[in-house]
Image: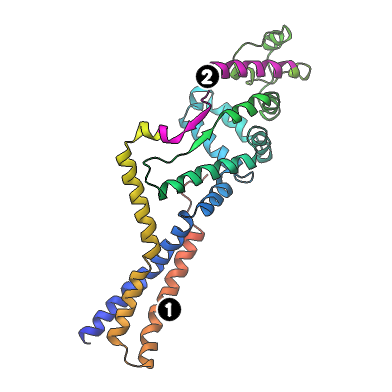
Amino acid sequence: MNAKKITAIVLLTLFVLSFPLALTISNLGSILFSQNKVTDLIVTNLVSDKALPSLIKEITILETEHGALNKLFDNRMLMNVLSGIQSNEWVELFNVVLPEKDRVGLVDNITAGLFAWFENSQPYPEITIQVSPIITRLDNNLPKVAAWIFRTFHVPACDATTIARYQAGNFGTDPQALITCTPPEDLKTSVIAGTVTAIQATLSKQAPPAEINLAQELGKQMPPEQMLAQKAKVNQVHTLSLFLWIVPVVFFLIAIALTVRSLKGLITWVQWPFFAVGALGSYLALRIGNPTPLITN
């Protein structure tokens, strides 16, 4: 076997190994570097009415085990409460506080600012999240939220001492304490009103900002030079995803130029690389379509 054939075999082997991978990277790039596709991906998998309940459950489980909720509530009690809440009940709550169309608008605002940043020379993305409308909507719907809590949180009935306190009109100022037991039906309306008052008092003491300016927040964490460097890397990856498929094609063309001298020779040298590319491409497609879960319940 002469040197040309050996070189051709090596190049065709590189073609077989690299072409499916290059196409996969290019396809992923066409999704990850498209504003509309990224928006649709986030909405479909995170913030839509269909996806949101699963996301909430995952977050609350993590927060209960490792985050702030672990410090506020008994783990076992909170997990029992959250596990009893149905998916449609989570959707009902979020449609009161932040309906799906507003969630989609929020995601669209963020992705639009992010992709505009990729194309400009600014060190930080100009993204502002308006918090005050969300807080206003929450405040206006606090009675519905409190009623939802008492309807969906399956906690033990209040003891006699707590009931007597409620009957006297003494509900306290701690909303967390109010939702740890279920009051009798004849007291629920007054307890819900007391819970709303307690939540409003808590929010007035810890008022959130009217808006979140992402550029300002990132500026506190990362200097502009570093942000520009990170943006340049992302744009380089984008460019690479667009043209990476050309490299294995060059390998293939060089291999064919070194060996093929007739139509019969072309068919002989093309058959096995394309068969192997098809097999490897099918394997990659199956793996991407059915990935191994990183977290199993």
- Prevalent SS, magenta region: helix
Residue 3: name its quadrant. Answer: bottom left
In the structure shown, which secondary structural element does the residue marked by tag 2 occupy? loop
Colour scheme of the picture = rainbow
Residue 206: image tag = 2
The residues colored magenta run 190-217
Instruction: From the top left corner, tell me how far across and down residue 234 is, in percent.
Output: 37, 51
Mark 1, other Cα within 10 Å: few <14 / some 14–19 / many ≥20: few
Amino acid marked by disc 1: Phe
Amino acid marked by disc 2: Gln
Residue 254, compared with residue 65, is above or below; it is below
Residue under circle 1?
Answer: 275
Residue 294: image tag = none
Instruction: From the top left corner, tell me how far across and down residue 270 is, in percent.
Output: 38, 83
User: What residue is at 72 percent from the left and 6 percent from the top?
Assistant: 168
Q: Nearer the viewer, residue 71 or 246?
A: 246
